[in-house]
Image (cartoon, grey):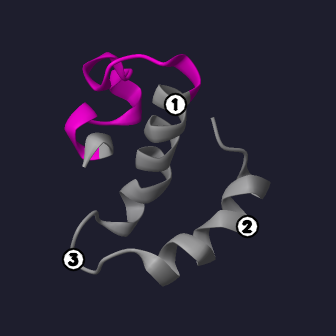
């Protein structure tokens, strides 16, 4: 969903504003991809594809 170039631009911004101790840093890219997928498709949270991680993580 996110290219490496897009993630390279977004990662520093996400790191600046994300709450500490919530989502482990290695999952941030996948979680953001799940949020974007849901927004683009207009689907319910539970319809987020499994490869994008647990739906409940993106919904939080």
Q: Position of residue 9 (x, y in %)?
A: 73, 67
Above or below — where is 21 with respect to 54?
Answer: below
Q: Earlier in the sequence, mark 3 or mark 1?
A: 3
State which region is magenta.
Answer: 40-57
Residue 39 is marked as 1
In which quarter of the view is residue 58 placed?
top left
Q: Secondary structure at mark 1?
A: helix
Q: Is residue 27 left or right of residue 16?
A: left
At horizontal 72% and vertical 45% (from top left) the residue drawn is: 3
At horizontal 65% and vertical 65% (from top left) the residue drawn is: 10
Q: Residues within 10 Å of mark 3 (few under 14, many from 20)?
A: few
Q: Which residue is mark 3?
A: 21
Q: Earlier in the sequence, mark 3 or mark 2?
A: 2
Mark 3 to mark 1 CA distance (whole Å): 25 Å
Mark 3 to mark 2 CA distance (whole Å): 22 Å
Q: Secondary structure at mark 2?
A: helix
Q: Residues within 10 Å of mark 1 (few under 14, many from 20)?
A: few
Q: Nearer the viewer, residue 5 or 19?
A: 19
Q: Position of residue 45 (x, y in %)?
A: 30, 26
* Residue 53 lies in the magenta-colored region: yes
Q: Which residue is mark 2?
A: 9
Q: Is residue 38 left or right of residue 9?
A: left
At horizontal 25% and vertical 21% (from top left) the residue drawn is: 46
């Amino acid at each position: 969903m996110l290219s490496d170039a897009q993630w390279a631009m977004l990662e520093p911004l996400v790191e600046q504003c994300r709450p500490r101790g919530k989502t482990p840093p290695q999952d941030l890219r996948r979680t953001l991809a799940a949020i974007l997928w849901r927004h683009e498709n207009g689907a319910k949270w539970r319809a987020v594809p499994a490869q994008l991680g647990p739906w409940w993580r993106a919904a939080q």
